[in-house]
Amino acid sequence: MACLPALAILLAAANTLGHKGSPETYYVSAGHLLLLKCPIAGENVTWAREEAMAGTIPSLPPGVEVIDDLLYFLPVQMSHNGTYSCESTVQSRSVKIDFCVSVSNGLCPPVAEVRSITLGVTKSLPCKLDDVLRRNHTRNIRWLRDCRPLEREGATISVHDSGLRLRKATEEDGGTYTCLVDISLRGRKYTSARSVQLDINNELTQAVFSEPEVIQHQDQVLVVDMGARVELKCLALLGYSQNEETTMFWIVNGSFADEDPELNETFHFTPDQGRVFGESILTISRVLPRFLNVFIRCRIQSPVKVKDCQVQLKEANHSWFHTGVAVGVATPLLLLLLVFLMLFFRVDLVLAYRRLHGYFVTPQDTEWVPYDALVSVVPAETSSSVASDFALHTLPGRLEERHGFRLFITGRDDIPGEAKLDAVAATLRRCRRLIIVVVSAKETDKEEEEQGEEEEWRPFSLGERQLSYEQKLGLHDALMHDTPPVILLEIDGRPDYGRLPQSLAYVKRRQGALAWNQSKRNRLFWKKLRLLMPDVPASRRSRPHQDHILLAQ
C-alpha cells in the first residue's frame, strides 16, 4: 500500500508532461550534443519518436541512440526536430512522458529560461546541464554573452554547479548567456549548450529592507587539525521578510569558495517569529595548508549594506601533548633507572662522596685518634701464612699506601720492651676501628696438621684457641659501648665459628663479614672495606707512605 502514493505521483507527472499537457521543450542548436533523461524510475525504459503519420511504427532517427537509458543526440541535426517519448513500466502499469526538441541553425541555442537580478547584487546564473556534467570527467566549461566570449571583470565559474557568478550586477550585464560544456564520447568531442536570458532590475521592490545583523560567527581564530573536516557556520538576521536580493556566501583568501573543489557552501532562509534569519555553512572536506592563516570571510550582501565577518584557521600544536606523554613515560623510567644505579653503585657513590668530603676534613680533626684501625688475626695460635701475608703486606699495601689510612698491625708495630697489656689497651683506645682477620677452617686444619703438637711462636699468637688480649678488649668495648666498630675479614673461605669464641660468632651474626679470596681480584671487597673505614683527609691521601713513617717515629 505504501507504493500507491508513489504510483499516483508518477501518473500525475505522466498526465502533466505526457499526453494531457504540453511536453517540456528543449532548445538546441544543430551540431550540439543533447541528452534526455527519463524521469520515470521504472523497468524497461524505451524511447521513441512520435511520427506525424498515423499507422507508422515509432522509432528513432539516425544519429539518436539510447545509452544507459539516456537518449543521446550525436549530434543534433535539423531533421531531429520533433517530439520524443520515454515509456516505462511502474507497478505493472505503463507510464509515458513526452519531450519536445526544438532545433535551430544558430551558433547558440534559443533562450530556454529568463532570469532577473537586482542591480548591484551578486548572483549566479545556473548552467543546468547536470546530466552532461556528470558524464564529463575532464570539465571544459565556457560562458558566452550574446554568443560572444565573456569579458567581464569579477565573473567567475563555480566548480560545483558550473554556474556563472556575477559580482555586483550592473545594467551592462543584461543579455543572453550561453553555457557550453565540452565532452568526449567514443573518441569524439561534442559540445552541449544551453542559453538563459538575464534581465537587470534597477527598481527596488516594495519590500522593506533592513540592515543585516550578524548573530553568530564573529571574528575569531579556530584551532584545527591538519586533514580534518571542518564546518564554519555564519548566522545573520536579514530582516522581517524574505527577499531574493539578499544572499550570503564565503570568500577564502580573496577567492570565492565555490571555486575550490575542497569547499562546499550552503545558504538558506529560516523564518522565526516574524523575523528572517539567513544561515550559510562552509564545509571544508579536509584542512589543507592553503586554508591556514588566511582570512575566511562570510559575506552578507543585501540591497542596504554589505557586511563581512571573518575567521582564521590555526593548526593545532600537539607538541605539548607529546612532550607531556614523553615526560610522563620517561619520568618513572628515569626514576627506576636512578634507583637501580644507586643500588648497583651505592658503594661507589658513598666512596665518591667521602673522597670529596675528605677535602673538607683537616688533619687536626683526626689527630686525637692517630690510628684508623688496629689489625689482628684469629685464631692467633694457628695463624696461617696466607693470613699473615694478608695482614702484614696485602692489607697495608692497599689501605695505607693507596688510600692514606693509618693501621696498627699487631706483630709489626709493637714496641719492644713495653708492657704488653698496657700498651695494647692504650693502642686500642687510639684506634677508630678494630679489624679482625679470621682464618678459614681449611687453613686452620692445615696448620694444625703441619704443627702437630709443637708450640711455635708467631706474630699475633697470644694463647691456644683463645682470643688475643686486644681482640677480647676490643670485642668487649664493641659489644658494651659500640666502640670501636669491629670489621670481620674472612680469609680464603668461611671459618668454623663453632670452634671460635661466641662473642666473635655474635658479631658475625649481627653485622656480617667481608670475604677475601687469594685467587680473585676482590674489587668489591676493597670497596666495601673502605666504606667501613673512617674518613681520611685529602692531604693524607697525597702522601700516605711518608705520613705512616712519621707516625711510627
Image (spheres, rainbow, N blue to C red):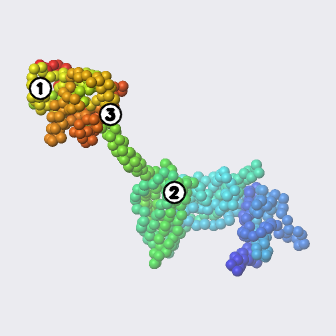
Quadrant position of residue 67: bottom right
Total numbered circles: 3
Marks 3 and 1 close (CB-CB < 8 Å): no
Report the residue marked by disc 2.
Answer: 229
Observer able to see residue 18 = no
Q: Secondary structure at mark 2?
A: loop
Q: Residues within 10 Å of mark 2 (few under 14, many from 20)?
A: few
Viewer-proximal residue among 133 and 333: 333
The amino acid type, in three-letter code, at marker 2 is: Arg
Q: Disc 1 or 2, which lies upstream in sequence?
A: 2
Asked if 107 appears above or below 333 in the picture, the reply is below
Q: Which mark is residue 420?
A: 1
Q: Which residue is mark 3?
A: 494
Residue occupying the far front of the picture: 453
Quadrant, the C terminus? top left
Query: Residues under labels 1 and 2: Cα distance?
Result: 98 Å
Q: Residue at x 73, y 69 (%)?
A: 41
Outermost residue toward the bottom in this view: 1
Q: Residues within 10 Å of mark 1 (few under 14, many from 20)?
A: few
